[in-house]
Amino acid sequence: MFDLDLWREIFQSINKNRTRSLLSGFTVAFAILLFAILFGISNGLQNYFTEAFGTDANNSIVIFPGMTTKAHKGLQAGRLIRFKNEDHDFIMDEFGDKVQYMTSKVNRNVTATFKGEKSNYQLRAVHPEYMFIENNVVSEGRYVNQNDLDRKTKVAVIGKVVNDELFAKENAIGKYVSLNGISFKVVGIFTDDEGDNEERVIYVPLTTAQFLYGNTDFIDFMHLTYNPEMNSDAALAFGTAITKKLKERFSVARSDQRAIRVHNMAQGTKQVDMMTFWLTVIIFIIGMGTLIAGVVGISNIMIFIVKERTKEIGIRKALGASPKSIVSMILLESILITTIAGYVGLLIGVGVLEWVGPSLEQYYIKDPYVSTRLVVGATITLIIAGAIAGYFPASRASKIKPIVALRND
Amino acid sequence: MLKIHQLHKSYPIGDSSLHVLKGIDLNVEDGEMVAIMGSSGSGKSTLLNIIGMLDEADSGDYILDGLPIKNLTEKKAALYRNKFLGFIFQSFNLINYKNALENVALPLYYQGMKRKERQEKAMFHLEKVGLADWAHHLPKELSGGQNQRVAIARALAANPKLLLADEPTGALDSTTSYDIMAFIQQLNDEGKTILMVTHEEDIANMCKRIVKLRDGVIMEDKKIKQVRVQQHV
């Protein structure tokens, strides 16, 4: 039921007591404003850090062979460890359920020539899964596939920079590029959002490279990503398990640090996770703190308002106002002010974030943004807090004998 | 109109209590104009407040226009105050952010009267106290006498049976006091029952009956010959 007269009374009271209304409105608006900005900034910080770690699979483990430094099981120190295809299969057999993608790699530096253009690039001989590990995007043509591996075809997938430098004038797909004198057919062009260095790369099938560079089944190192559902602790344990198995397989002393090296991104992921966690905790504390400050502020103001209006309440009661009408008048006024002020604070806060957001990237804050639901939730919290904080003094004041209220000159 | 029997009231002061009214018996008929006199602390204001349902008695009977006033809920008390009583206070007790018209209309608002109707009615009463031209002024823009007249108009607005005045001239100079008294006499002539607390002899003599209180009991209760004031507005 909409009581026009009641609202008229409320609007008059708000309008005629501007200082009081502005004061309480300001408290709420400021609390919501701070809340929005602080949350926005910390969201921005999180965005920045998430992006700083790029789109490379951050669940990857790279396994490098090295040289033994300790004698073990009758074998001398200084023995060179080399991985072969069977080691790749061994890991897949042992840990297949924990592996998401896996590739072996042979890296070479090659000189690529095409119609008089000539430049040096990195050649990576890989399995097709490598595309997912590096998060490469094929912009034209296709990637290395299983068929290439089976048939040891001489095909190449070139990075965007390679394409721009060698094939400035024509479409590279289907052309033959010479890599250290051997012709490869270009079947695809890829991009990598990590930038030029990752695009100065040529991919060829692993088996083709092994065949061409000595007809061996050696591989330089292995690169895999673990099941992303694993948390960082499980991933670290997984890395340790691989190390242990490989050390047994190659008869390497357990304490030998250099024969087989496992570089586990989970180490970094764990740190990022920790940082994100603490950032969330700090955001939460700041948010709660701001909100509590706002609640305390609006509560104080409500107590003050009721105190200030005690005499008016007495007069109204003497003239026949029921306690209910007194309480609803005070509460509706407070709810109205908090709602409007909260909305204003929300608008200003979001506006400020929009406005200064883009210039904050140099301070490690990217896309500072706060969800409307969160701020509206905070505003509603303040409205409810204000209503509760106002209810008790208002209800007490409405029950004071009018004569006590009137005596309060 | 008003029957009071063995009314007692005490206020707690720390551990002990102060017995303010010690068994008051008072009957007021329709159309009377009664002055309640007494030195400060005699209990005269307390008596008026209990009559006005602004305060409650500890024991005793109070019957207003045939209705027993006892153990009222706040809501009921508010309703009765609105319906039966009009208040005039020493310090006017107008709401400072409302203009004269709005102040007069307030009791009508609590009666649930429509806005237009109550404004017309309030204007009528303002005209009656001679302040129609000041209807849209705030209390702080009016003189003490004018404010008291606004308060009287407000007390009259709900057309109460009984008008209660607590030192209505206490904050006014004597000329203005006499103006106000002349007006109150006029209301009485029109048939309103009036109960007034005062400690000024000359004001009391303008009523028709004087009840003297001392230390919570009625010392003297006599009808007097009313001194008429000439209204000179």
Image (cartoon, rainbow, N blue to C red):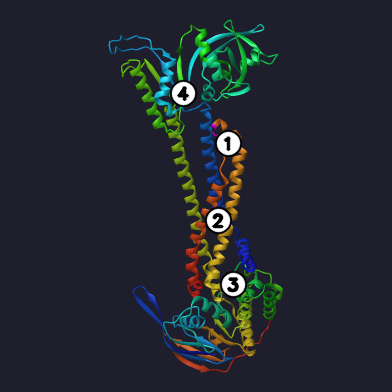
Chain hosting mark 1: A
Asked if residue A263 can be seen in this view, the reply is: no
- Check disc 1 and give the amino acid type: Asp
* Dots 2 and 1 on the same chain: yes
The alpha-carbon separation of the residues under discs 2 and 4 comes to: 59 Å
- Region of the chain picked out in magenta, as a range: A363-367
- Check disc 2 and give the amino acid type: Ser
Q: Secondary structure at mark 1?
A: loop
> Foreground mark, 3 or 4?
4
Q: Is residue A193 above or below residue A316?
A: above
Q: Is residue A196 above or below residue A234?
A: above
Residue closer to the observer: A64 or B63: A64
Q: 10 Å neighbourhood of mark 3: few (<14), some, or many (≥20)? A: many
Q: 10 Å neighbourhood of mark 2: few (<14), some, or many (≥20)? A: many
* Dots 2 and 4 on the same chain: yes
Q: Quadrant of the N terminus of chain B?
A: bottom right
Q: Position of residue A25 (x, y in %)?
A: 57, 54
Write down the residue under mark 2.
Answer: A24
Say which label, 4 or 1, has the lower sequence index. Answer: 4
The alpha-carbon separation of the residues under discs 4 and 1 comes to: 32 Å
* Dots 3 and 1 on the same chain: no
Q: Position of residue B170 (x, y in %)?
A: 55, 78
| Residue A364 part of the magenta segment | yes
* Dots 4 and 1 on the same chain: yes
Chief SS of the magenta region: loop
- Check disc 3 and give the amino acid type: Leu
The alpha-carbon separation of the residues under discs 3 and 2 comes to: 25 Å
- Check disc 4 and give the amino acid type: Leu
Q: Is residue A69 above or below residue B2?
A: above
Write down the residue under mark 4.
Answer: A224
Write down the residue under mark 3.
Answer: B94
Write down the residue under mark 1.
Answer: A367
